[in-house]
Amino acid sequence: MAYTALVTPLQVCLLDISFDTLFVMSMCTDFVFLLDMVLQFFTTYARTTPSGVVWEVRLDMIAKHYLHSWFLFDLLTVIPFDLLGLLTNAEALKDLKMVKVIRTLRLVKLVRLLKSSNLLHRLEIPFSLPYQQFALLRFLSVLVLMCHWLACVWALTLQLVDRDYPQWIDDVEAVDGEFGIRTRESAWRIYVASFYFCSYTMTSVGYGDFGPKNILERLVCTMMVMVSGLCWAYILGEVCAIVADMNADSQLFRKKMHQLNVMMRDQGLPHELRSRLRSFFLQNRHQIQYQKQLQLLDNMSPRLQAEVCRVLTLTWIRKVPFFLQFMNLTERMASRGMQTATFEACIADISRRLQCTAYAQADCFTNVQVLHILSKGLVALDNRFGKMGTVWGEDFVLADKSLIHVVNCVAMSYCEVFFLTRENFMAVVEEEYLP
């Protein structure tokens, strides 16, 4: 990704096509993108449903989703126009600038990859960076990267306009010429001048040392001003949001992480334990948010509480065999026109009493008279492994603990578990929902 973000724009906009190391690396990058295209037809994607986010595994739906989203962009970026030009000695193809510009479309895909990447998340675990500084560093990196891309586009205008017309580089060349420097023959000097122009244009400083001299440069400069203006406004807005910290949940989480970092530093905890703690808190953030959202149930009517809980947890309750049989029986009775209100109320009440918790990697837990449903992660259950949807502790309804089969559980990764205690289950039964 770094090669595509930094080197590809330079190759397209500044460097001549030749068989060298950069060309070989570019072909290798194209091959990686080609493999990625093939894998996209077999890669699941997240799909939002009323019961939560699910992963689409049907190959036909995966292919349809990819064909309607990024396929065309990906196809354009892997066409080896440069290689075809070298192999056929087609100068027209090698010099066709718009063909080269098409290759920069992979930068759009790069943004998509960065958005779904856990790179920042992984960097945050071993290092104790204050969130404000981390966010400011991230926006500074975005600013520099945008300047780099715009500088390459600005330099590309020199190749798109004939030298008989005035160009923005003329002013720079006039100054450098007094010292015997031939600016046009040096790609890095052109890049420095372009980066300098884009940096003061993007930050709205506007020294005015040089500017567009022909119609194409004016059009490109107008586009750059609009794009850079939007980016600069976005960055300023995000920085102001960081300073003001309007998001209460984020503020509370950052405060908790700060307190955790301070505690670990003051107590002198080992580095490995610090990383595990940060990893657990970061991974557990969404579950904490989910539990806080469940507090909204207190402001709902009993019927709405039951309906919301049923939608949120019905997928997991169906993983329990005897609950699944009970719900199938209810559905068959409803299809025959029989009264099932009490049965549906029973399922809703069980859904409302279902609780969730989380375990860090290597945690051991053995609870009796508790039904467990694994919703995330991987656990070791005695002599077998459990993945998402695994159920254990189905004998939790037994009153005599000596009859219960005790399962020793070890979290092989970060795990989130739904659980139902015997006490809560019997409370549902005692409410006489069942005949």
Image: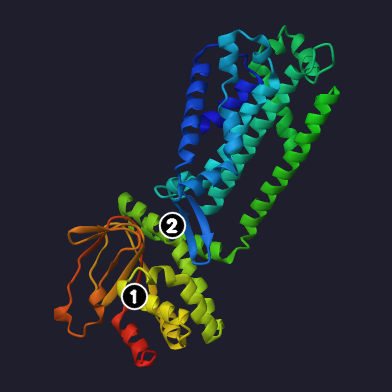
Q: Camera-side residue: 204 or 226?
A: 226
Where residue 39 appears, as percent x and y from the top left, is 45, 38
Of the numbered discs 2 and 1, the one sitting upstream in the chain is: 2
Q: Secondary structure at mark 1?
A: helix
Tell me which residue sits at (67%, 47%) in the image.
Answer: 235
Inspect the image, locate mark 2, and give the three-letter code of the amino acid beneath it: Leu
Inspect the image, locate mark 1, and give the three-letter code of the amino acid beneath it: Gln
**Rendered position, 416 above or below 335:** above
Q: Which residue position holds label 2? A: 282
- Crowding around mark 2 (Cα neighbors within 10 Å: few <14, some 14 to 19, many 20+) is some
Is residue 425 found left or right of 406 in the rendered image?
right
Where residue 301 appears, as percent x and y from the top left, is 55, 85
Tell me which residue sits at (49%, 74%) in the image.
Answer: 294
Q: Secondary structure at mark 2?
A: helix
Q: Is the Cβ of the residue at disc 2 closer than 8 Å to that at disc 1?
A: no
Q: Which residue position holds label 1? A: 325
- Can residue 65 be seen here? The reply is yes
The CA distance from mark 2 to mark 1 is 37 Å
Q: Camera-side residue: 113 or 434?
A: 434
| Quadrant in which residue 244 is drawn | bottom right
Q: Residue 208 has which mark?
A: none
- Can residue 207 be seen here? The reply is no
Where residue 280 appears, as percent x and y from the top left, is 38, 58
Q: How is the image coloured?
A: rainbow
Is residue 275 found left or right of 23 in the rendered image?
left
